[in-house]
Image (cartoon, rainbow, N blue to C red):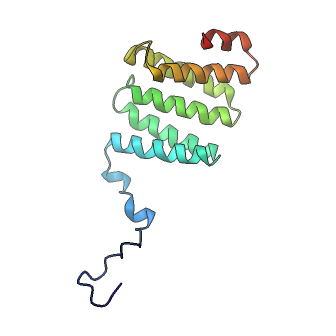
């Protein structure tokens, strides 16, 4: 910072604020903002192959979304994400009911033609394929 700068203590334009300074404290976020925060954190962890961490973030996103209603589409999106984190960890038995619940919510809330439903059906088919349940997977791919 230059000595003649009239705003003392503010960061230079090329000095990014630390991550802690840029994220608001959870206590000041509403459930929709919390859902977004946990969902983004989960996806970042998933992309970095930190599957257990991703699962934790996605579970927190489910809780935040459930405050919007048990059948809210965000609940289904987050359940789908938890299931994918479980699948990557080999937790197939845990992933299946999560995907089935997500599919049920999406079918009733968004309808049978919605792309989000197709994605969850595809994820369940991929889970069945991984488990060598070809007949079950084939029915979902249709």
Q: Residue furthest left?
A: 6
How many numbered dots are placed on residues in this image? 0
Q: Nearer the viewer, residue 89 or 117?
A: 117
Residue at 51% across, 38% down? 59
Asked if residue 23 lies left or right of residue 56, the reply is: left
Determine the image quadrant of residue 12.
bottom left
Name which quarter of the figure residue 120 lies in: top right
In the image shown, does 118 or 32 lie closer to the viewer?
118
| Position of residue 13 measured from the top left corner of the image (x, y, whole percent) | 36, 72
Q: Is residue 139 above or below residue 68?
A: above
Instruction: Please report the residue visible at 59 percent of the width from the left and 21 percent of the height from the top.
Output: 122
**Quarter-of-image position of residue 46:** top right
> In the image, is residue 19 above or below residue 44?
below
Image location of residue 14, percent across then percent down = 41, 72
Q: Quadrant of the C terminus?
A: top right
* Left or right side of 118 for 135: right
- What residue appears at the point 40 percent right and 26 percent down from the top-left corner? 73
User: Which is more toward the observer, 55 or 44?
Assistant: 44
Q: Position of residue 65 (x, y in %)?
A: 39, 34
Give the residue furthest to the bottom: 3
Tell me the quarter of the image containing the N terminus. bottom left
Q: Is residue 19 above or below residue 46?
A: below
Q: Residue, x 43% and y 63% (percent of image)?
A: 20
């Amino acid at each position: 910072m230059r000595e003649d700068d009239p705003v003392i203590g503010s960061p230079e334009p090329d000095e990014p604020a630390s991550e802690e300074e840029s994220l608001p404290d959870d206590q000041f976020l509403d459930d929709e903002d919390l859902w977004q925060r946990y969902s983004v954190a989960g996806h970042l962890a998933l992309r970095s192959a930190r599957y257990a961490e991703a699962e934790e973030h996605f579970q927190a996103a489910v809780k935040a979304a459930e405050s919007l209603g048990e059948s809210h589409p965000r609940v289904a999106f987050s359940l789908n994400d938890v299931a994918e984190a479980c699948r990557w960890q080999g937790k197939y038995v845990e992933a299946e009911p999560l995907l089935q619940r997500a599919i049920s919510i999406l079918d009733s809330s968004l309808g049978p033609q919605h792309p989000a439903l197709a994605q969850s059906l595809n994820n369940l088919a991929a889970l069945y394929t991984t488990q060598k349940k070809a007949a079950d997977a084939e029915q979902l791919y249709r």
